[in-house]
Image: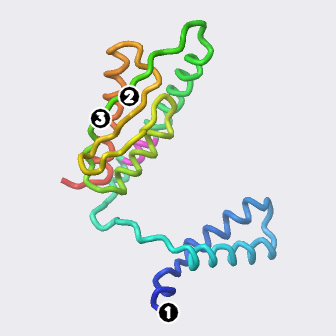
Amino acid sequence: MYSGVRNRFRPITIILFTLMWCLLMGEFTWANVIGGLLIGLAVVLLLPLPKLPVSNISMNWPAAFGFILRWFKELVQASITVAWLAIRPKDPPKTAVVQVPMRVANELVLTLATAAYNLQPGGSVSDIDIANRQWTVHLLNADNEELLAQEIEKVAQLERDMIRIFERS
């Protein structure tokens, strides 16, 4: 029993929970710090999470930094596009549901790619076929073949970015 507790005890996670608790409370007081520590301990010890499968993952930090910058740029562009689609004086755009490949080797990387795609407005992953490494994606704006091809290319670019950031050839 004690070895299980020893394996679950993660001091950095407890410190992060304490910091988040103090930020949620709006001030750093002794009571908030102690409360945060107790909540962090309770979460880490009573609600254990499995270890992340990071054995075959290595980070390419310059590629990750470039991806983050490009992701924020695309976030702004997609937000403006979706806002325009909402207020323009035309009928709503045609939508589409497509299947696209996402051939990253690690499930954690697949999860990170899915989160990065779903946080962008204009499309969302509605299903993940892990065995075939395929996403089912709902696209908001598929009025013509060109827009559909652009969205599929965005997914292909995301796949290339994730492979460049996390996988070594």
Q: Is residue 32 above or below residue 119?
A: below
Q: Is residue 144 above or below residue 45?
A: above
Amino acid carrying mark 3 in the image: Val
The residues bearing labels 1 and 3 have C-alpha atoms spaced at a distance of: 46 Å
Disc 2 element: strand
Query: In this view of the protein, which residue sits in the foreground, 57 or 129?
Result: 129
Which residue reaches farthest top?
89
Disc 3 element: strand
Crowd tier of the residue under label 2, counting other residues whose Cα lies within 10 Å: few below 14, some 14–19, many 20 or above: some
Disc 1 element: helix
Instruction: Give the label on residue 97, or none.
Output: 2
Q: Is residue 131 above or below residue 102?
A: below
Query: In this view of the protein, which residue sits in the foreground, 2 or 61?
Result: 2
Q: Which residue is mark 1?
A: 2
Disc 2 and disc 3 in contact, CB within 8 angstroms? no
Instruction: Give the label on residue 96, or none.
Output: none
Which-is-in-front pick, marks 2 and 1? 2
Instruction: Give the label on residue 100, or none.
Output: 3
Disc 2 and disc 1 in contact, CB within 8 angstroms? no
Q: Position of residue 48 (x, y in %)?
A: 51, 74
